[in-house]
Amino acid sequence: MSDRYLAFANSTSGRRLVSALGLPAPLLLERWMAGRSRPVDGALLIGGEGSLASAMLPFANKLTDALFAAREGQFDLPRWTAEHGPKLKALVFDASGLTRFEQLIELRDFFQPAFKGLDKCPRVVILGRAPESLKDPIAASVQRSLEGFSRSLGKEIRRGGNVQLIYVGKGGETQLEGALRFFLSPKSAYVSGQVLRLNACSEQVKDWTRPLAGKKALVTGASRGIGAAIAETLARDGAEVVLLDVPPAKDALDALAARLGGSVLALDICASDAAAQLVEALADGIDIVVHNAGITRDKTLAKMSDDFWNSVINVNLNAPQVLTQALLDAGKLHDNGRVVLIASISGIAGNMGQTNYAVSKAGVIGLAQAWAPALAKRGISINAVAPGFIETQMTAAIPLTIREAGRRMNSMGQGGLPQDVAEAVAWFAQPGSGAATAQVLRVCGQSLLGA
Amino acid sequence: MSDRYLAFANSTSGRRLVSALGLPAPLLLERWMAGRSRPVDGALLIGGEGSLASAMLPFANKLTDALFAAREGQFDLPRWTAEHGPKLKALVFDASGLTRFEQLIELRDFFQPAFKGLDKCPRVVILGRAPESLKDPIAASVQRSLEGFSRSLGKEIRRGGNVQLIYVGKGGETQLEGALRFFLSPKSAYVSGQVLRLNACSEQVKDWTRPLAGKKALVTGASRGIGAAIAETLARDGAEVVLLDVPPAKDALDALAARLGGSVLALDICASDAAAQLVEALADGIDIVVHNAGITRDKTLAKMSDDFWNSVINVNLNAPQVLTQALLDAGKLHDNGRVVLIASISGIAGNMGQTNYAVSKAGVIGLAQAWAPALAKRGISINAVAPGFIETQMTAAIPLTIREAGRRMNSMGQGGLPQDVAEAVAWFAQPGSGAATAQVLRVCGQSLLGA
């Protein structure tokens, strides 16, 4: 780990010193370990009066060994209280039944006592209905107000916890299990303050231990960093991986393929024949495409050269479009395919010295949003994952003070790991995750930076 | 001014000391002064190849005395170069013609030389087409990528400058003048990094010196701070104001009314008969409604009392809804009316210790978005203005270190003034500003904080 302060603050002697000096003490986040059985390693508390909490009950006992309700007799579950219950590892509050302003205090009524009994790295999910789907302005406003609540809660929770808001649309209930297996488990360790919309999806995960079994996945920029983590995670989840990177990275690709059992494609995605080569290599077609390859060439606009501008636009924005188009034109992207683009917090908030990069990453978000309606007709989803500060060779090269600011200015007080981005990608890649499309999921520890 | 550092850094002796010590030197922002004639007090440079730049030409010479084009012979205007042109006070780049990724470099080609010749407090507007209105995924992505560019540019521009992106939809060209009179003038001093959508509007401003002439405007919470500034600004622009605040503030209301020539309504907006009283007081109806009254009652959720929660929800969220509904039901809100809600950056990004406030302010954004479609049928617009850190009695009460962080963590290195919020409200209140509805305009100096 390159974040030495985080390691120190979580060591036995370091913890004491950090506490004595009153320094911030970011918690070492729990991550998903292969072979783990239940998504929630501890107690799960369910509350709220809407129909979504009820929709959870058929599968909730597969998420945890210890299910509780917030009220006596609710859902036929034992009641949890801060005095008598175990520490809480996960909380789900169904706010979909809230339609009037005076009901909003139910949020406080649920979370105030529950926050007294939180375990380490607790996960919170608030369920609601998308405001734009509601006709009554008050009900729509109530649901919209959940954004302010969940984002504030994300800033208050501490202890390595996170908070998300999921708007469940028509038919989205049937894919709640997959979403909660991600958001209530350590797989979402570095995701917080996010708002996601879930709708209907015709596919279902068959085996939760290998949700991507039978699927073939292409990962660009797979030789190292985030790309390698994505490949590992997709392979862990059962996918057959095709690892793509530039020819100079072929040795690294081969080593990774030997470990993961996938195949290798050493190819410059900006080459004029890249699309043709890719189509040829994927003779049997592909189910999952992860456009991860990306570069930075930072300069203020005053000093931005043709080469810096064009290379970033070409690799980060043009290549994903050209390759996606080629796969579609050649009929190589299967029905119910999953396309995931890697964007960036810079594409959302903008960044000094990154006009080229921010353009490319905002453009990538634009690609997901523009392609989604047409692809939905074939059950294909297309989404963007936007990393914040992730500990990689790329961020290790940032000057110390800027690096430290980027690392600490988020609700977790630390940078994320490549695995965190990979888990989000792997969730979007699941069969049932077609319930989400045209969306942007930030993996940023709820970075303060935004738009 | 309560920002003593800003005053010091802009004083003759202070400027030298601040520079010698290498401290950040936020620039005293130019504000609009009553009686001023032209929106742009200096040279205006126009560039880009789309049809929107052309749509500007009929009125562009009313914005400034010194119009220039970026290319030889373009628009029959003199060509500006960094070597020979005057300093630039405003820049408009029409990016609506960009449809391919390789054209994006035209952004750099226009702004790189122009940035060498910027005057103090320069204003930049980039014009584009809303991505969701475009069928071609590449063209949509190109337009979407402008967000990343404009937000990065806002972080690079410095010198008190700002940068906005305006997506112009069908018929929106006819309301460009009003938008540019706001965004290219000191009226938008503390607005930056914003994205706005303009569509058709049947009304037009008749007299730019008094754009609100003949309109009657209600302002809640008008006795002080941002509310008083809004009332003053609406009155400056020709509106007849109705000043509303709680009964204990009646003396302040009377004094303001005496100065502005408006009428006074001393009324608790949360009283059970508030709506009835308001409807009775506005016998002739109303054109402009500004829901500005708001309170904070900050506590972490762990310590959030019923009273703190409910009072904030009632004043900030329920009252605007109840009053708007009552005015509509009683037929008192005129056709082509303008409703402006005051939201907050907390409602967008969430804030520690403000779950109640963030809920209310996110809910207010929800109200604007939920009401807009129905109200549009009568030509009524409804929008939210979301202030960031504004220098008021409310923010003066924040502890020093938190206050300083809020003040400096934005592209301007300073807090905004109540006038800055008021100018945004006054722009939304204009007849032609029906072109914008269901929108959120942040007045935050491009605060780093976001979602």
Image: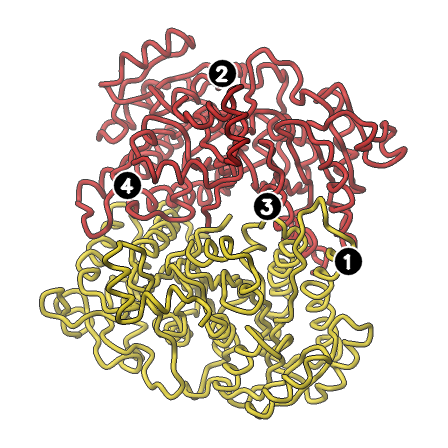
Chain colours: A red, B yellow
- Which of discs 4 and 3 lies nearer the camera? The answer is 3
Could you say whether the residue bearing mark 4 is in a helix, strand or loop? helix
Mark 2 or mark 3, which is nearer to you? 3
| Residue A245 visible in the picture | yes
Residue in view at x 56 percent, y 81 percent: B231
Most foreground residue, B162 or B130 = B162
Chain letter, disc 3 residue = A
Q: Which mark is residue A239?
A: 2
> Marks 4 and 1: which is nearer the front?
1
Q: Amino acid at mark 1?
A: Asp
Residue at 74% over, 62% down: B311
- How many other residues sit within 10 Å of disc 3, few (<14), some (14-19) or many (≥20)? many
Q: Give the answer, above or below, for where A367 lies relative to A255.
A: below
Q: Quadrant of the N terminus of chain B?
A: bottom left
Residue on which the image places disc 1 = B307
Q: Marks 4/1: CA distance?
A: 53 Å
Disc 1 is attached to a residue of which chain? B
Separation of marks 2 and 3 at Cα, in angstroms = 34 Å
